[in-house]
Structure formats: structure tokens, C-alpha cells
Image: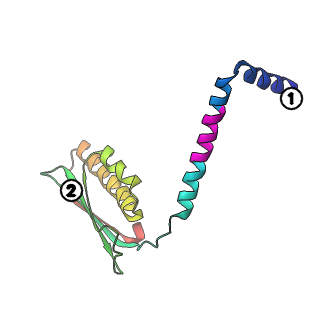
Amino acid sequence: MWAAEKARDEAYSVVEGDEFSKIINQRQREVYRRRRMMYELRNVPRMVAARPEMILVSYDFTEDAYECRIFYKEPRPAGELDRVNVKAAFDTILELRSHPDPNVRLASGKIEEFHALRRRLVKQEALPPSRRVFYQNEL
């Protein structure tokens, strides 16, 4: 216990004058930045997202891209997407995981799953499917 306190005091005694105040100011700014981010997250109104009934992922050979259509049972809220297009590459598919719409994030996981299946079948020299339907029980 004493050794840890002594080491801490020695570490702070090396920094003197303006350098110490700079460190304190940087840490204080970081604390305020984190608090501001937390308050912003708390103040975001929670939306009730309509759960999709079905997701259709189809592959376009000419553009080397996936088209994903999201079908809803109930009427779709105004801000939600029903169609997503993405290039057939893991990097672009993974970028959809940070989309603000939870259904697009859900669809990105299904696109990634279909993409992995297609790549595995191509490596096995089998004919990969051009579309895949994910029903509500698979979501």
C-alpha cells in the first residue's frame, strides 16, 4: 500500500507547473465530453421499430451487389427503410452494422450470412443461390 502511494506521488512530482495543469485540463475535458455523450444518448427518444415479417436478399450478378428488401406485416413507420443496396464485399456489408435503423442492422446480419454462404459454395465449385428469404422466425 505504501509503495503504491509513494510511486503515485513520485509520478506526479515529475510533472510540474504548466504541464500538470495541462494534464488536469485534458482529463477534465474528457470527463465533460463523456458526460455530454451520455446525456445526449439519454435524451434521444426511443422509437418503437416495426419488426420485419420477412427479409429477401438477392444477388445481382451484373453489379456484384446485394439488394435487400424488408417486408413488414403492419404499416411501416415513415422513417424506416424497406430496401437496402450494398456491394458484395465484407467491408461494405459491415458498414451497415452501424446504421441508425435497427431493421437495417438486422438486415445487414442476414446479408452477411447470405454472402458467407455464397462464398463457401463458390469455393466448393457449387452453384450458389441468387436469393434467400429470411422469415420472421429466423430473425
Q: Identity of the amino acid at label 1? A: Met
Look at mark 1 in the image and give the residue it sits on. 1
| 77 to 100, vertically: above or below | below
Could you say where residue 56 lies in the image, as x and y percent from the top left? 27, 66
Residue located at (31% from left, 55% from top): 114
Position of residue 21 measured from the top left corner of the image (x, y, whole percent): 66, 30
Q: Earlier in the sequence, mark 2 or mark 1?
A: 1
Does the residue at mark 2 contact the one at mark 1 (Cβ under 8 Å)? no
Mark 1 closeness class: few <14, some 14–19, many ≥20 residues within 10 Å:
few
Q: Is residue 48 left or right of residue 78?
A: right
Viewer-proximal residue, 128 or 22? 22
Which residue is more in the foreground, 7 or 70? 7
Q: Going by the image, does 47 lie left or right of 58? A: right
Q: In this picture, which residue range is highlighted in magenta?
A: 24-33
Q: Amino acid at mark 2?
A: Tyr
Residue 88 — which label?
none
Residue 52, position in %: x, y?
37, 72
> Comparing marks 2 and 1, which lies closer to the viewer?
1
Residue in the foreground of this view, choosing between 113 and 26: 26
Q: Is residue 131 left or right of residue 42?
A: left
- Is 64 one of the magenta-colored residues? no
Q: Main secondary structure of the magenta part?
A: helix
What residue is disc 2 on?
A: 59
Q: Quadrant of residue 42?
A: bottom right
